[in-house]
C-alpha cells in the first residue's frame, strides 16, 4: 500500500506538471503570435518560390522564411496576419482586398507560366499550340492528340492516337489565374463557361497540388498537358509547347519574349492598386515576339505593420538590379522601370 | 473485459470507510479535468463547424447534398460528387482490404510457423506507420503509371462489359485511390483481427479439431463465428479511416470535381480531400462556408460510423458470452 500511495503521488505530480506545461504552451501561443524579431515570414505563390530561394542567402538584412503554399493560401495567410508578407501571382480580388484589411500589392517579379506536354514520340519543345486549341483541350472538346485541329498546326510531327489528359492546379493558384486569364481572352466559350480566377470549375482533366504536383502528374501520365512556371519546367525536364501569340509567331517563354509582353505596361498608366495584366498582347510589330502567358507576380503587405521598416528594406532590395538579375537564370525577366517606379511609390506608403 | 467492467464501480473506492486522501482527490480532479476537456473540445469543434457552415446551409439547404460541382467563379457549390467519391473509394477499399486482412490474420495466428509470426506481424503493422503523404507520393509516381499502363487496360479489355471497368486516360483515378486506401486500412483491420483470433479460447479450437474437423472447418466453425462482432467493428474502424483520409486521396484521385461516373478508371474527389485541397484558396465567404458544410457532413458521418461500431461491438460481445458459456 505505501508503495501504491507513492505511485499515486508521483502520477499526480507528473499529471499536474503536464497540465501546467500544456496550459503554459496554450497561453504562449495565444499571446506570442507568429512573429519573432529579425525574421521576415512569408507565404504564398509557388511561382516566386525559386526566386526567394535565391534571395534568402543573398539578402543581408533580416532572415527570410518562405512557405510555398500557393497564391490563394498566401492571400489568406496575410489576411490573418500569420505572416509578414504574402505572395500572389493573381492580383487581389475585391473581396480579398476587403478581407485583407488595408493591404497593398506590389509587383516584384516578372515571369511566365507555360504549357508543358508529355507526348511519346514528339521531340522536346516542338509541339505548336494556339490559344483556342489550348482552350478547347481544357474544355474537353479536343480529346485526342491526333485531332485535326492540332495536326494542322504541326505538319512535321507524328502525333499519336492518344487521349489527352489536361492537368490543372487543384489548389488556388496564381498560375491558374494567369492561365485562365489568357484562355478567357482567346476563347469566348471559356470566358462564359469557366471564367478567370485562382480556382475555377474545370470541365475535365485531373488536378495536381502546387506547381510540383502538376509537374509530377504531367511526367507520370503519357498524353498529358499541364501548365507550370518555368523553374519547374527546367527542374523536372518537362517539354514545353510553343504558344502562338496574336502576331502569329510561336513562342517559348524566354527573358526576351517575356520582356516583349511587358511592354504592354504604359508608363504613368498603372492603376493605383498596381493591378497589371500582360497576357495575350495584341497583334503589333512591338509584340511580334511576345509570350502570351507572361505575368507580374506580387508581394502583398499590410500598409500598417510593426515590421513596416523591415519590409520596406527587403522589398526595395528585391526590386533592385542585383536581386532582379540574380533570378534571370530561372527565367525571371528584370522588372521594367515604369513598374519598379510604381512599386516603389506604393512601398513608400508603408508605415508602422 | 466484461468482468473488469462489472467490478469497475466497486473498484473506485476499495475501502469505503477510509479517510479521504488528498492524493486521490487530486488524481480524480486532474483525470476528470482531462476527460471534461475532451468533451468540451468536441463540443467546441462541432459548434464551430455548424457555425461556419451556416451561410452555405441557408444558401443551398439540402440541395447541397445532391448538387455535383464546385464552381468558385459562379459561386455554385455542391457535395454530391464528393459524397459519391467518398462512398465509392471507402467501400471499395473496405471490400478489398477485408478478405486480405482476414487472410493475413488467419495466417499469422493459425497457419504460419512460429518463427515467422513475429517479424511478419511487425511488418504488417509498420504499414500503418507510413505517413499518408508518402503513400500518396508513391501512388502518383509509381502506382498510378503502372495501373494506367498495364492493369487498367487489361481489366478494361477482359471485364469491360461491366461499367465499372471503363476506358482510362490517366493514372490518377478513383481506382488508384481505392488501392491506396486499401493499403492504408489493411494494417488496421488485420492487426485487430489478429488480436481477436489470438483471443479465441484454445479449448474450443481443440474441441473442434478433436471432433475431426479440418483446419478450415475449425476456422469457419469456431474462429470466425466467435470473433464476428469484433471483426465487424474492425471493418468499421477501417471504413472510418478510409472516409477521413484526405492527403493521399487528394494526391491520387485526380481531384476532378465536375461530374460522377461509375467508371472506376475516371478521376474523382472525396469530401476530406476537397477540404484539404481547397481550404487555403477559398476566396469568398460562401466558398469557405461550403467547405465547412463538407466538414459537417464528414463529422456527422464519422459520428454515425463510431456509434455503429459501438453497437456492433456490444452485440458481438453479448453473443461471444453466450458462445463461451
Image: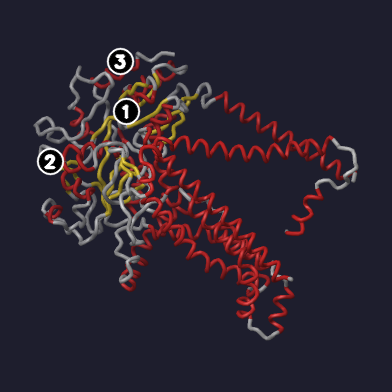
Q: Report the chain holding disc 1.
A: A
Q: Going from the N terminus, do you reach mark 2 or mark 1 first?
A: 1
Picture residue at 77% right of the left edge, 52% below the top: B8
Q: What colouring does the structure picture have?
A: secondary structure
Chain-order first, disc 3 or disc 1 = 1
What label does residue A345 carry, if any?
A: 3
Secondary element under disc 1, as helix, strand or loop, is: loop
Front one among B108 and B83: B83
Of residue A34 and residue A237, the one placed in the foreground of this image is A34
In the rendered structure, the answer to whether residue A346 lies left or right of residue B6 reads left
Does dot 3 land on a helix, a strand or a loop?
helix
Q: Which residue is mark 1?
A: A92
Q: Quadrant of residue A339?
A: top left
Mark 1 residue crowding within 10 angstroms, few (<14) / some (14–19) / many (20+): many
Please say if B307 is above or below A30.
below
Secondary structure at badge 2 equals loop
Label at residue B55? none
The quadrant in which the C terminus of chain A is found is top left
B252 up-or-down from A50: above or below: below
Q: Name the residue located 42 percent from the left edge and 48 percent from the top edge.
A: B271
- Left or right of residue A169: residue B192: right
Q: Which residue is mark 2?
A: A249
Residue at 65% x, 70% y is B226
Q: CA distance from mark 2 to mark 1?
A: 32 Å
| Residue B278 on image: x %, y % | 39, 41
| Label 2 vs 3, first from the N-terminus | 2
Amino acid at each position: 500500500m505505501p508503495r501504491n500511495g507513492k505511485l499515486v503521488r508521483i502520477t499526480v505530480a507528473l499529471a499536474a506538471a503536464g497540465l501546467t506545461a500544456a496550459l503554459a504552451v496554450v497561453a504562449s501561443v495565444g499571446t506570442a503570435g507568429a512573429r519573432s524579431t529579425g525574421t521576415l515570414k512569408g507565404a504564398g505563390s509557388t511561382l516566386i518560390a525559386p526566386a526567394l530561394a535565391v534571395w534568402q542567402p543573398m539578402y543581408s538584412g533580416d532572415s527570410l522564411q518562405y512557405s510555398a503554399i500557393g497564391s490563394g493560401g498566401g492571400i489568406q495567410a496575410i489576411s490573418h496576419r500569420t505572416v509578414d508578407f504574402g505572395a500572389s501571382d493573381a492580383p487581389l480580388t475585391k473581396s480579398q482586398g476587403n478581407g485583407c484589411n488595408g493591404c497593398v500589392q506590389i509587383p516584384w517579379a516578372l515571369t511566365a507560366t507555360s504549357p508543358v506536354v508529355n507526348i511519346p514520340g514528339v521531340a522536346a519543345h516542338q509541339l505548336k499550340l494556339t490559344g483556342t486549341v489550348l482552350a478547347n483541350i481544357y474544355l474537353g472538346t479536343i480529346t485526342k492528340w491526333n485531332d485535326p485541329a492540332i495536326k494542322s498546326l504541326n505538319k512535321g510531327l507524328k502525333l499519336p492516337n492518344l487521349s489527352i489528359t489536361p492537368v490543372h492546379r487543384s489548389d488556388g493558384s496564381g498560375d491558374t489565374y494567369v492561365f485562365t486569364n489568357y484562355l478567357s481572352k482567346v476563347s469566348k466559350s471559356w470566358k462564359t463557361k469557366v471564367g478567370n480566377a485562382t480556382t475555377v470549375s474545370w470541365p475535365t482533366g485531373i488536378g495536381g497540388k502546387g506547381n510540383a504536383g502538376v509537374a509530377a502528374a504531367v511526367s507520370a501520365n503519357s498524353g498529358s498537358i499541364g501548365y507550370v512556371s518555368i523553374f519547374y519546367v527546367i527542374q523536372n525536364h518537362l517539354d514545353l509547347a510553343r504558344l502562338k501569340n496574336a502576331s502569329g509567331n510561336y513562342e517559348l517563354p524566354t527573358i526576351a519574349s517575356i520582356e516583349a509582353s511587358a511592354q504592354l505596361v504604359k508608363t504613368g498608366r498603372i492603376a493605383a492598386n498596381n493591378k497589371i495584366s500582360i497576357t495575350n498582347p495584341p497583334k503589333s510589330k512591338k509584340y511580334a515576339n511576345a509570350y502570351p502567358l507572361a505575368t507580374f507576380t506580387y508581394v502583398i503587405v499590410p500598409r500598417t505593420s510593426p515590421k513596416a521598416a523591415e519590409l520596406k528594406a527587403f522589398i526595395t532590395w528585391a526590386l533592385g538590379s542585383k536581386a532582379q538579375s540574380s533570378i534571370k537564370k530561372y527565367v525571371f525577366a528584370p522588372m521594367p522601370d515604369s513598374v519598379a517606379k510604381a512599386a516603389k511609390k506604393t512601398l513608400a506608403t508603408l508605415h508602422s | 473485459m466484461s468482468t473488469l467492467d462489472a467490478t469497475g464501480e466497486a473498484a473506485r473506492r476499495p475501502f469505503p470507510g477510509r479517510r479521504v486522501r488528498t492524493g486521490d482527490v487530486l488524481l480524480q480532479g486532474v483525470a476528470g479535468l482531462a476527460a471534461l476537456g475532451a468533451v468540451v473540445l468536441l463540443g467546441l469543434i462541432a459548434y464551430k463547424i455548424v457555425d461556419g457552415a451556416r451561410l452555405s446551409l441557408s444558401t443551398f439547404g439540402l440541395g447541397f447534398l445532391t448538387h455535383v460541382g464546385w464552381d468558385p467563379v459562379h459561386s455554385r457549390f455542391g457535395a454530391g460528387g464528393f459524397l459519391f467519391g467518398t462512398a465509392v473509394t471507402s467501400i471499395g477499399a473496405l471490400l478489398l482490404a477485408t478478405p486480405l486482412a482476414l487472410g493475413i490474420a488467419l495466417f499469422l495466428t493459425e497457419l504460419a510457423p512460429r518463427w515467422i509470426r513475429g517479424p511478419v506481424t511487425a511488418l504488417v503493422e509498420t504499414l500503418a506507420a507510413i505517413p499518408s503523404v508518402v503513400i500518396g507520393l508513391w501512388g502518383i509516381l509509381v502506382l498510378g503509371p503502372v495501373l494506367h499502363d498495364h492493369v487498367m487496360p487489361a481489366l478494361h479489355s477482359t471485364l469491360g462489359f461491366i461499367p465499372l471497368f471503363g476506358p482510362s486516360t490517366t493514372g490518377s483515378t478513383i481506382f488508384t485511390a481505392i488501392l491506396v486506401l486499401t493499403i492504408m486500412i489493411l494494417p488496421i483491420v488485420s492487426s485487430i483481427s489478429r488480436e481477436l483470433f489470438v483471443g479465441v479460447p484454445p479449448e474450443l479450437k481443440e474441441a473442434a479439431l478433436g471432433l475431426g474437423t479440418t483446419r478450415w472447418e475449425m476456422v469457419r466453425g469456431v474462429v470466425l463465428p466467435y470473433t464476428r462482432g469484433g471483426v465487424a467493428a474492425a471493418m468499421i474502424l477501417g471504413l472510418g479511416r478510409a472516409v477521413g483520409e484526405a492527403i493521399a486521396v487528394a494526391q491520387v484521385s485526380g481531384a476532378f470535381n465536375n461530374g460522377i461516373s461509375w467508371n472506376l478508371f475516371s478521376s474523382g474527389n472525396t469530401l476530406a480531400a476537397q477540404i484539404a485541397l481547397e481550404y487555403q484558396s477559398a476566396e469568398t465567404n460562401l466558398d469557405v462556408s461550403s467547405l465547412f458544410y463538407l466538414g459537417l457532413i464528414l463529422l456527422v458521418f464519422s459520428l454515425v460510423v463510431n456509434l455503429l461500431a459501438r453497437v456492433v461491438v456490444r452485440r458481438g460481445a453479448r453473443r461471444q458470452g453466450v458462445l463461451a458459456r
